[in-house]
Image (cartoon, rainbow, N blue to C red):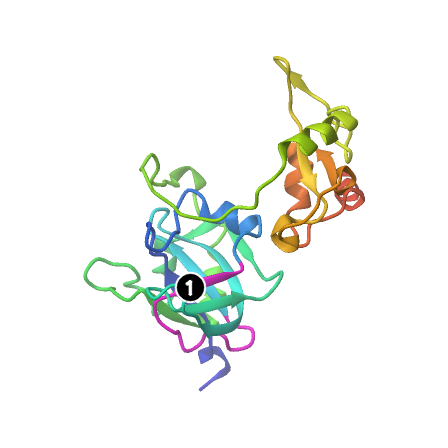
Amino acid sequence: MSYNDDVVSVIVKIAFGNKSEVYPDRYIDEMREGKWTRWNTPRKYQHLGTKGNKLILYDSTRKALTLEVEIQEVKEQNDDPGYPWSNVFAPGSLNIFETGIPVESIRKVKGFENFSVFKKDRSPYRNVTRQQYESLLKHQFTYDIESAVASEGYMSERKYLSFERNRDIVRKRRIKDDYTCQSCGFRLEVEGRFVIECHHVMQLADTGETITTINDLVSLCPTCHRIAHICRPPLGVADVKTMRESM
């Protein structure tokens, strides 16, 4: 096998719906916010888990490849019998194709001429060689974002656990900070309500049940709050400020 014939990634077609708990209108943002640390699949894919190999997701609503992430480990788990194989992400390896790689471009790559063609491609996954992978990436900037479509407005039922937050201590922190972002100084009141959010210095997802003091919180504007959560653990206020000043 030549260097270019090595399989370096696997394209998996997303199964949207209640069973998979993956929804087209939210999974990309959830990925960006660090809410996913693994991707469960109904079968074990041979080339995932090999050092450096990546999982690439194909979104049938956008008809495009939307993101890739390196798989650090593949392990069998019992909490979801329909999706027993857990593909664990390598930290910091997520790459979102902001413009997408459309299906028309995928089909221009040798070996992918019938990718997702009705009745010709029923496979839920496709192995990708190094040469094919390099060809795919050349097309990620050719996507016309105006043609993007997504299914919305449907009703869905989800069962999940959430970390409870104490609203009273959040309110007191906002008052202490005078409803002002402690990173950039932004302060805005609209019709008697302040546009400000409260950030936990340590994520409750990491600490679990804990006693929170007012000094464990800080007021941030929506933009700085979003920046803080681009990493896990979140960036500190000083780091967010430095990042904004460098823009």
Name the image quarter holding the C terminus: top right
Front in this rendered view, residue 207 or 43 = 207
Is 118 left, or right, of 104 in this rendering? Answer: left
Q: Which residue is depicted at the point 61% across and 63% down?
A: 91
Q: Secondary structure at mark 1?
A: strand
Is 49 left, or right, of 192 in this rendering? Answer: left
The amino acid beneath tag 1 is: Asn
Relative height, residue 208 to residue 149 (above, below): below
Instruction: Name the residue beneath numbered marker 1.
Output: 40
> Which residue of the protein is positioned furthest toward the left in this rendering?
119
Is 163 left, or right, of 25 in this rendering? Answer: right
Per the picture, the main secondary structure of the magenta-coloured stretch is loop
Instruction: Say whether residue 47 is magenta.
Output: yes
Q: Position of residue 181 (x, y in %)?
A: 74, 31
Task: Please tell me how crowded label 1 is: few (under 14), some (14-19), or many (20+) other residues with Cα within 10 Å.
Answer: some
Task: Choose top left, top right, bottom left or bottom right for residue 170.
Answer: top right
Q: Would residue 177 be visible to someone looking at this image?
A: no
Stretch in magenta: 37-53
Front in this rendered view, residue 156 or 117 = 156
Q: Position of residue 7 (x, y in %)?
A: 45, 76
Relative height, residue 195 to residue 85 (above, below): above
Instruction: Say whether residue 35 is magenta.
Output: no
Relative height, residue 232 to residue 221 (above, below): below
Q: Which residue is depicted at the point 65% across and 35% down?
A: 223
Q: Would residue 242 be visible to someone looking at this image?
A: yes
